Image: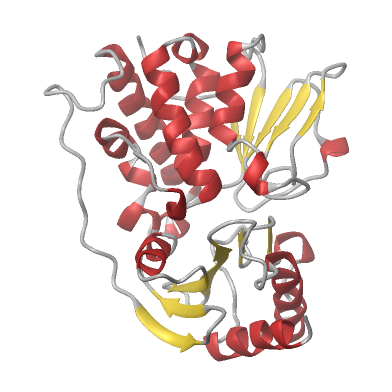
Amino acid sequence: MTPDTELPSVLIERGRTVLFDELPARCIALDGYVQGPAIDAEHERFSFDHHAGCIRHATLSTCEMALDAVRVGLAPGGFTLCVNDLDPDTVLAVWLLLRPNAAADDSVAAAIRAAGRLDALGPAVGGPGLVPALRWALDPVAGDAAAGLRSLADDEYRRVLVRCVERLDRWFAVGAPHAHPALPAPNPGSPPQIEVLHESPAWTLARSPAGLGGFRCLYEKGVRAAVVCRPLRDGSAEYTVGKASEFVSDFPVPRILAALARAESSANPAQSPAHNWGGGSTIGGSPRNPDGSASRLDWRVVAEVVEGVLRVQ
């Protein structure tokens, strides 16, 4: 299989979100470019998102939506794929829609479903997660590498996606195995460092350079709701607000995100409402601004806002 190194059918607009009604015909919005899942077969436009307007526990991840769509009849040739951020879920969806013949392979499907459950439900779900070959293929957008993505120029950012697509092509070419001698071993990385900044019976706020990876450590310690802060080089901070599942009832993620969005707008009037705090019923986070910056809120303010929401439940 010859990789399409230019990926002309992929539109990357970092941090951008649009309404589904604004999405042109023959476009597929991936993982937050449009908030919430949507299908408009008449105009051939679709949103494969599992963050807003859905029950997270019962909604497939973006890569699983792409997998199933292709397997049950979507012919994605000629569509524009709209992306506003690169993470393993989005990259896998892009690859499946660019290489629809791969979706028919049962080994590919099994690996995608394991990755999708991990993305949709988080590390609390357990299971196999990313198989070793996929960890290698997605290494440029996962783990420690993810921390540097925001600082990349647009052409370098696109090149990261191209590199992942090329690696996934290599994986498929050797039969989509869990691991294979022809593929380098995945980079195991270092155990994520966790610094607990605020702790209460209901939730924990921690700082970690691993961002989302910090949740696995917290869940392993018995924490079921948390905010993880990852400082960025520009002085802003990326926050992820999450809980282990929909069944953790004393940590209302949507209300917390809405309160943090109000606090962000108050502290930083220049913050665009289109890129403010947002997410779904079990996970969300700080602004994804086009310039790569995130929240300007100090962690102490974040802790105060969260505690304020919990006090009025």
Can you say which quadrant of the picture contains the N terminus? top left
Can residue 9 be seen at all in this image of the molecule? no
| Residue depicted at 11% across the width and 23% down the height | 181
* Quadrant in which the C terminus appears: bottom right
- The percent position of residue 176, horizontal first and vertical second, equals 31, 18
Q: In the displayed structure, does residue 149 sit left or right of residue 66?
A: left
Picture coordinates of residue 123, whole percent (x, y): 43, 53
Horizontal side, residue 102 vs residue 294: left or right: left
- Please name whichever residue, 229 or 29, is drawn nearer the observer in this view of the structure: 229
Q: Position of residue 53 (x, y in %)?
A: 78, 47
| Corner quadrant of residue 45 | top right
Residue 104 vs residue 273, the one in the foreground? 104
Displayed quadrant of residue 83 = top right
State whether residue 215 appears in this view: yes
Residue 184 against residue 191 in the figure, above or below? above
In this picture, is 261 found above or below 14?
below
The residue positioned farthest toward the left in the image shown: 181
Rendered location of residue 30, percent (x, y): 63, 36
Q: How is the image coloured?
A: secondary structure
- Marker count (numbered): 0
Residue at 43%, 64% in the rendered image = 215
In percent of the image, x 41 and y 23: which residue is there?
Answer: 110
Q: Residue at x 52, y 19 (%)?
A: 98
283 lies above or below 168? below
Left or right of 222 in this view: 190: left
Specify whether 76 is left or right of 23: left
Q: Nearer the viewer, residue 165 or 111?
A: 111
Residue 150 drawn above or below residue 107: below
